[in-house]
Image (cartoon, rainbow, N blue to C red):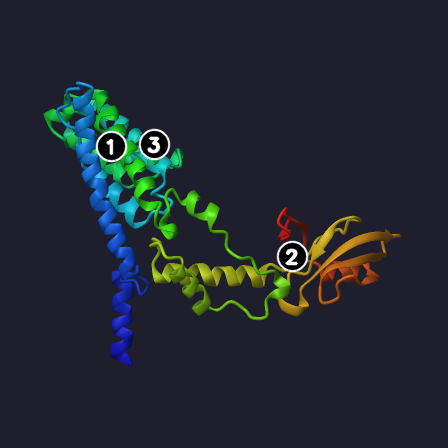
Amino acid sequence: MMNNGLTKEIKLFLGIPTIGPTFKEIIVSSFTALLATLCVIYISKDLLSYFNVHANIYILIPIAATSVLVFVVPHGALSQPWQVIVGNLVSAFIGVTCYQYFGNDLATAAALSVSFSIMTMSLLRCVHPPGGATALGAVLGGDTIHQLGYSYLLIPTLLNCLIIISVAIALNYPFSWRRYPSHLYYKNNLTNTISPGARANEVTVEDFMKAVTEHGSFIDMTDEGWNEIFEKAKQHAEYDNVHPHNIESGQTYSNGKIGKEWEIREVLTISNKKTVKYFVLAGENINLLESCSVKEFIAWSKFKVNKNNIGIWERLT
């Protein structure tokens, strides 16, 4: 038992996940990344030659890291087109600017380029880790890159980013579970929604982790991170016992329960601020017309709800 506990602690400390990608996913991501890298190299070179554009460098080295994100974690928040294109572009701009103003002190210019890139990407919601390397490359890339000046933004940065995005869309599309960008996957793969009234069991950690595994695509989260999210969700469910201060006629309310205890009621009338007449819209007692005191109704209800356009009850904020 002690050895097992120590082994588990070492794995957690090192960040070795228990949930990993399937062998099929590994093969697909590796092969598509291979094709994408070849496309970036040859398409960039051929395009520039076709348009008679002379470029001392046509490959952005950090594009290799971008390729890892786009093809290994295609549904990751840091892998989407906005992050890839804007994250690299703003970082390239900052890197060139830092070199031009602080080039006499490369260490200072390099540090500032990475720092300002992180700040700007965060502000623009385009955080893309390879962007830091793009900025650093503009400072420490040597004379070949320094001579490009702000042309570094267009060639190779923008050119390579557009190619990698285009290739990622094309190569990932045949694999329905990893279509890129993530919107193409979620748009066509709507998860079946289970209404609270149809649920008979509580969600367990095992259920949650199984759902994570079934997601198919790699998700950048440690085991401890998943457990923390699950536990916090349970805590919010337990602590969310706030009841509405006032009940309004014509509004619809839920008791926030699951299974047979779940119920949706519509308030029909409120008499003298004391008695509520309501109609049960969903739950075990559907179509029941009943009344109770305002105090009892407030104690029963947890929040307002509304039925969306596909017939699912949603909580109103």
* Count of residue discs: 3
Q: Is residue 3 above or below residue 177?
A: below
Spatial distance from mark 3 to mark 2, Cα to Cα? 42 Å
Q: Where on the picture, by quarter, is residue 221? A: bottom left
Residue furthest to the front in view is: 174
Q: Where on the picture, by quarter, is residue 113? A: top left
Q: Earlier in the sequence, mark 3 or mark 2?
A: 3
Q: Which residue is mark 1?
A: 160
- Frontmost of labels 3 and 1 is 1
Q: Residues within 10 Å of mark 1 (few under 14, many from 20)?
A: many
Residue furthest to the right in view is: 272
Amino acid type at circle 2 is Val
- Front residue of this view, candidates 265 and 51: 51
| Residue 188 spot, x, y in % from top left | 47, 47
Q: Secondary structure at mark 1?
A: helix
130 sits to left or right of 247:
left
Q: Where on the picture, by quarter, is residue 281? A: bottom right
In the rendering, which numbered label is found on residue 242? 2
